[in-house]
Image (cartoon, coloured by chain):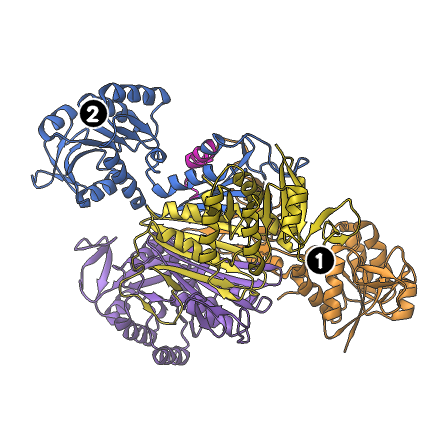
Chain colours: A blue, B yellow, C purple, D orange
Amino acid sequence: MTIKVAIAGARGRLGSAALTAIMKAPNMDLVAVLDYKYEGQYLHGTEVNDDASGIPIYTSLEKLAAANKPDVLLDVTDPDAVFKNVHDAITLGIRPVVGTSGLSKDNIALLTDLAAKNLIGGIIAPNFSIGAVLMMKFSAIAARYLGDIEILEMHHDNKVDAPSGTAVKTAEMISEVRDSHRQGHPDEKEHQAGARGADFEGMKIHSIRLPGLLAHQQVLLGGEGELLSIRHDSFDRKSFAPGILMAIHNVMERLDLVYGLENIID
Amino acid sequence: MTIKVAIAGARGRLGSAALTAIMKAPNMDLVAVLDYKYEGQYLHGTEVNDDASGIPIYTSLEKLAAANKPDVLLDVTDPDAVFKNVHDAITLGIRPVVGTSGLSKDNIALLTDLAAKNLIGGIIAPNFSIGAVLMMKFSAIAARYLGDIEILEMHHDNKVDAPSGTAVKTAEMISEVRDSHRQGHPDEKEHQAGARGADFEGMKIHSIRLPGLLAHQQVLLGGEGELLSIRHDSFDRKSFAPGILMAIHNVMERLDLVYGLENIID
Amino acid sequence: MTIKVAIAGARGRLGSAALTAIMKAPNMDLVAVLDYKYEGQYLHGTEVNDDASGIPIYTSLEKLAAANKPDVLLDVTDPDAVFKNVHDAITLGIRPVVGTSGLSKDNIALLTDLAAKNLIGGIIAPNFSIGAVLMMKFSAIAARYLGDIEILEMHHDNKVDAPSGTAVKTAEMISEVRDSHRQGHPDEKEHQAGARGADFEGMKIHSIRLPGLLAHQQVLLGGEGELLSIRHDSFDRKSFAPGILMAIHNVMERLDLVYGLENIID
Amino acid sequence: MTIKVAIAGARGRLGSAALTAIMKAPNMDLVAVLDYKYEGQYLHGTEVNDDASGIPIYTSLEKLAAANKPDVLLDVTDPDAVFKNVHDAITLGIRPVVGTSGLSKDNIALLTDLAAKNLIGGIIAPNFSIGAVLMMKFSAIAARYLGDIEILEMHHDNKVDAPSGTAVKTAEMISEVRDSHRQGHPDEKEHQAGARGADFEGMKIHSIRLPGLLAHQQVLLGGEGELLSIRHDSFDRKSFAPGILMAIHNVMERLDLVYGLENIID
């Protein structure tokens, strides 16, 4: 079976990488693009023109669906557009695969309900990197045995926020299996504020920002006489492609909407 | 319930660390020591004397069992002694926990059969480090998604063998889920022999030996645009204690003999 | 003083990064481009056209020199073109800064002689990364104190050659201060060929190749009870710009031609 | 020439490692031990008794000097004893090699003056690890080229103080060559206090504390498109021996007292 895919956000950087991956995938067919402009035109790579050999562009999901009957809508737009797109997709019987962070908890709950009522599969994943998700999952498993943990995330100094969303998500996943407890020496003295990092239920998070860095994270789990370190380096946006393709396959086989790629990786 | 434990090999370095851990464990009772000499004497830490406040030493497992009725025999002796000890233990209804590598495949099969017939739990583990076992398990899981893998193991230069047993075991566990395939550039040129490491069904293993190093291993799993690294550092023999205690608990609840700590860690 | 710079190879990837850096440098003036075609046209970023607001293109260094009087010629062309370009530059009184590897030892000697006779400064650098050069220099200094060394280089699996040129260069620089000696256990057994890496006068070199990797090298120096690790990660071609600018400044102040960026870094 | 060495603090852990190293050194002679008790007895390894085949113990440096004429006094006692010992040694013409931290700046200045007046060599080194000192020196050199720096130190969680003395010393050495400047994004937002570490003139210091860890430090220096990392792992007290022996040789050839092993390593 060939899965018919439509993309919303195809002209963005992630969208453009996704588009290439989907067009190369042997059992997928990229049938249409949803955009907020360029109705009736065609997408050729990152260029838009009248040449009908490209992917047809629609500004209405309803029209797009009527003409192309996609199985899946990959939405990599921004937080403003995504809720309506996904809501409409579910109503139209199109399975949503969402790579945009920024949906509120309420909206996620609402979409989850809607998908359940319509018996339609879907996934919302703030991070499509399989490697990053494995790092988080493994950390949470290992935390049952090695419960003293520090997270070290390293990014380019053009990143404004510290700690990173992935570091916080990792700490949250670990917290579900780890009893909150203070780490370090009971009489620890922090002679310079901040040396021991940010506290997350006793775990410590350290954020490094340097020119040159890309996106890296290391989870250190210590036990008496040993250390387990799980590290993920993200060098290129291309690393999201396998996770996106996996998600597209996965939503075809389910009847509910899940949050987080970790829930479709065994 | 308190688990009654006997140790064979208690005067060795691993045995001595195990003894300390078992004596500290709240729900375990160290009842006796099996040795090839010192019958009728007592063990106090690493010292042997006549002071009956120590752990009684036996040279016969039968006598030891009759007098102390241990639930578990922890055997950390050498390859020569271990088979008879474990065979006798199973026959006597004592659950074996074995931390000695060097048992042949035939002998392991034989003991597994014997335990099955006697409906007695047991475990043979060449490596009691939970951290190392997690590294291996995680590598094998991740290999399903990131199939290009190199293993880098680093040890003190007083180690004779390369690659290490743990590196080979890791490669074997990965091979069970990874299709054998050649890695690297198809036209790869190794200008100096050995640069690309040892080959294990297409995976590469590199062994580093330097004074200063202890025991370290890193598994590198690459995908387009990303790298997942799982590293274990073993700094001290104390790191084996939690794995030994976990195994002692586990054999109380099973009716068969398993090989490898990885099979009792979820 | 503003340094007038011409570039040969400006349309290549390294050339294009260099061009951007030179145009931004406050005390440099990019006056012209030497190319094998496009005579009389103009370079705008990576595009060539007739718009005279760009950088003028010449196919003859003689004409370029007559019209623009550059102080320095940055040559980032290929091995075929570079010798003639540099030879001509020195003869014309233009200081060469060469970022092309592939010049033979004989040709380097010849150009060194020519520069000495003409009392003209120049530099030939196979690697313009200051970070990589520091890694090599530091390794050679540390080798006097910590003489057991292994080099681990890691590259994308689209790299054909192993070990990398930088790894070999590092080993050569270390060898100048380190007495050749066998490392590892005297009775070392390599159970799988290649595990212990390539041998370079007793040092070991290990080459890792994985999709996802960029260009990374780690030099491990071991002493009893300690390990010193010096690592360089090269994430982007932009990292060459500071070394190129430093070299351009340096050749203005010297009267000979040097080989290797390490000779102009203190 | 054989150097005659006396040790103060020989029964401590560092003293005991130093004693072994000095006794093995081909061109050194361990002539006596200075202690606060055991006058007239003899040291055998870590044991004290009457057997005159051991190293003679004195409680007075004057008597020790009269009887044994040592060239060098290695002082690895505690902050309370060290000042008087070193003062007396210089007065008696014995070169001090001091491995005790905790001398005040005033006392160091006073001893430096005294040594200068007496034209006697000496060294006070808070850290005798050559590897650690190389890490600090290299970081300070590299900081001239790669000025954005974060220091990551990792220790066992039985360490009370954060950041470590070595991390602060590293930051101080770097500050001598690096202009103080704010690092990270100008609009950086620390959503959880401490995430970005402790600030040292714009550099960041992060302290990790986990069971299992020993003593490790990593200096990360970033430039556009590249990262240089210099790491030191201290696994065992034995690593101090080469630095102590080097210092003993060095003080024989100088006529002043220096502070810091970095000043006798080229």
- Residue A89 is labelled as 2
Residue B126 seen by the camera: yes
The chain containing the residue under callout 1 comes to D
Q: Are marks 2 and 1 on the same chain?
A: no
Q: How many marks?
A: 2
Crowdedness of circle 1 by 10 Å Cα count: few (<14), some, many (20+)?
many
Which residue in the structure is indicated by mark 1?
Answer: D125
- Residue A177 is labelled as none
Residue at 11% across, 39% down: A49
Label 2: which secondary element: helix
Crowdedness of circle 2 by 10 Å Cα count: few (<14), some, many (20+)?
many
User: For this rendering, which residue is in front, C172 or B212?
Assistant: B212
Which quarter of the rendered picture does the C terminus of chain A lie within? top left
Residue at 56% across, 43% down: B93
Q: Which residues are magenta?
A: A155-172
Residue C231 painted magenta: no
Q: Quadrant of residue B248?
A: top right
User: For this rendering, which residue is in front, C237 or D130?
Assistant: D130
The chain containing the residue under callout 2 comes to A
Residue at 8% across, 41% down: A53
Q: Nearer the viewer, mark 2 or mark 1?
A: 2
Label 1: which secondary element: loop
Q: CA distance from mark 2 to mark 1?
A: 70 Å
Q: Left of B113 or right of it: where is D35? A: right
Q: Is residue A240 above or below residue A87?
A: below
Q: Quadrant of residue D208?
A: top right
